[in-house]
Amino acid sequence: MPVAVLHASVARPSGRLGPLAVEAPDEDVFTLAVAAAEALPPESRPVTRVDLVGEFPPESEWEILEALGTPEASVHRSPPGAAHLLETLRSHPDTPAAGVRLVLAGDVSALGPGNRLEHGALAVAFRLGDGPGLSFSSIASHATSPATPSARLRLPAAHGAEPTPLLLLGSEARVASAARDAGGLGYAPGIVPHAPPGTGPAPSTPTAVALRAAPPGEGGPIEFVLAALGADRDVYAYGRSTGRVAWSEALSSATVALAAPPVRDTPADLDLRAEGAYVPRPRYVENLPSRWRLLADHCGACGHRTFPSRGSCQACGSAEVAPEPLSRVGWIVEAVTTVRPGAQPTEFDRTVGLAGAYSVVVARSPEGPRATFQVAGPSGTVALGASVVPVLRRLYPMEGEWRYGRKAISGPNSSG
Ligand SMILES: [Zn+2]
């Protein structure tokens, strides 16, 4: 059986520039990819191979594995773009039969000519395995020739039986024109994800989201074509659907209204030597299992959970402890405070400058231990008694890199 996409999940950014969804100051391609991976169901572990598709910085390779708690998995890289994503989903690398293979595709916003945003941000996580699901048999890519759209659309027919339906992606004008040209062929065009008029361009991972609209394959396998009509290059993928792909969506936080497009970090931005809470890198890395994966020590002698993990029981002193992650949902807020601009530690100057005041909460996990979290998004969006979920976000730059940690966002059963 060919390798197939079995499950996928989408993580949308919380920043808004006008109606367009872009990364907030504490989000990037790494945090969005982790959010997407964490929205996959529990059977998506243990991960033995991760493919990263997009402009992931080099440190994302170990950071992703640390965040997923699978340091022994292998990481493979592909550049951004529809052709690379589809090629990665089509590839059949040798992976251990017992393990799970994830493909993580991510985009942050990009500025085009005239300082206009070309696309927003998005990340999608795919779990691959033996079907039923979606699989691809071939990918074709060629330079765009606006003069001969019909010739392009007839290309799939050269690959044997005429596949159906055809999913078209691209600018609204190009999709409309291609749909007219394809009318006689019986294809079903569509813009996925559907963008209401005036909401700006889609992220450059629309191919990923387009798979959501691919035929479910109920009542027998269906062959289909997906076409991504780019500004300078068109990509066609020929696929087969043998069953419905399950989709999930990462919980999103309160939106952050931005006054200007996100800017890329310069080395000077990251070379911060905070006068405040300086955390040497070795200590930061050592604490990541607790900071990122909420790892606690569960005591075999008295049952107490010590958080953060420290190798022994805080209640009875026993060293008979086993590492066990706390739940990621259902934390209840027990105290809230707001940090006004000017009152923040200096390492938060940059994010406060871009996003304003922020809140800090003390929350209790379902297992008992409490922790202090900064709230992601605007202050005042999380109330006392609310249910919150700790998500991975940027904290502050230090020693030439971003430091990350868990921040709280409103949980599924919270009105906050
Ligand atoms: Zn104990």
Image (cartoon, rainbow, N blue to C red):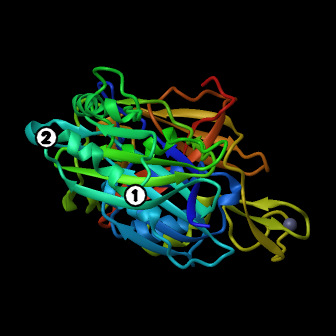
Given residues 119 and 192, the one toward you in this image is 192
Q: Is residue 26 visible?
A: no
Indicate left or right for 416 with 359 as reference: right
In the rendered view, tell whether residue 276 sits above or below residue 111.
Answer: below
The quarter in which the N terminus is drawn is: bottom right
Q: Secondary structure at mark 2?
A: loop
Say left or right for 85 vs 7.
left
- Can you give x and y, in whole percent of width and height, for residue 319 in the image? 81, 77
Q: Estimate how packed mark 2 is, as few (under 14), some (14 to 19) or many (20 or more) residues with alpha carbons within 10 Å.
A: few
Q: Neighbour class for label 1 at 10 Å: few (<14), some, many (≥20)?
A: many
In the picture, the disc for residue 146 is 2
Q: Looking at the image, is 104 positioned above or below residue 383? A: below
Closest to the observer: 134 or 205? 134
Mark seen at residue 86: 1
Quarter of the C terminus within the rendering: top right
As shown in the figure, which amino acid type bears the numbered disc 2? Answer: Pro
Q: Quadrant of residue 256?
A: top left
